Amino acid sequence: MNRRTALENLIQLKLPLQQSISTLAQFEWDSEIELVNLEASQIQNVLKLFKQGTISSVDVEAWANAIEGRDDIKIASLLIREALYELANPYLTKPLCIERANFWLSQKL
C-alpha cells in the first residue's frame, strides 16, 4: 500500500482505525508535499458515526490525533482545522458529546 492510499484510508475510515494508524507508521512523518485533503465531509462522517454509536469519543480523538499536525494532509479550511483541533484535544477544549457533534455538524465547515 502506498502512502496516499494509507492516508485516504485513515481520513475516510475505510479500514479499522488502528490498522490505518499502524500502516501509516511505516512511512516517515514528515513530507514535502500534501498528498490528500481533509475536507468537511470527512469530519461530518466521523461525527455522524459517533452520533450513531458506531465509534466512541475515544475513537474520534484517536482519529483526529492521527491526522492533526501531519505534513502530508492538507486541511481544507480554518474551520475544519479548528474542529480537528477540538476533536484531537478534548481535555484542552471541549469533550465530544452529542451536543458538540451537533454543533460541528451545523457549522459550514
Image: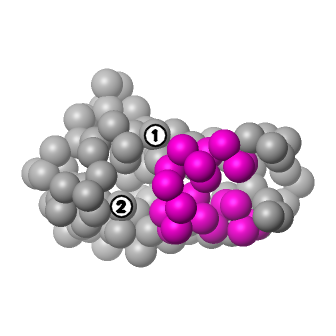
Total marks placed:
2
Point 34% across, 68% down: residue = 44
Task: Decide: few, some or many residues near mark 2? Use Cα within 10 Å; few <14, some 14-19, many ≥20.
Answer: many
- What stretch of residues is rendered in magenta? 4-24
Residue 80: x, y in percent?
Answer: 44, 60
Could you tell which of marks 1 and 2 lies nearer the N-terminus? 2
Residue 94 — which label?
none
Identify the image quadrant of the C terminus.
bottom left
Residue 13: x, y in percent?
Answer: 49, 63
Q: CA distance from mark 1 to mark 2?
A: 11 Å
Residue where numbered disc 2 is placed: 46
Residue type (three-letter) at the residue carrying disc 2: Val
Identify the image quadrant of the N terminus.
bottom right
Residue where numbered disc 1 is placed: 62
Establish if 71 lies above or below 49.
Answer: above
Determine which quarter of the picture holds residue 26.
top right
The answer to whether residue 11 is magenta is: yes
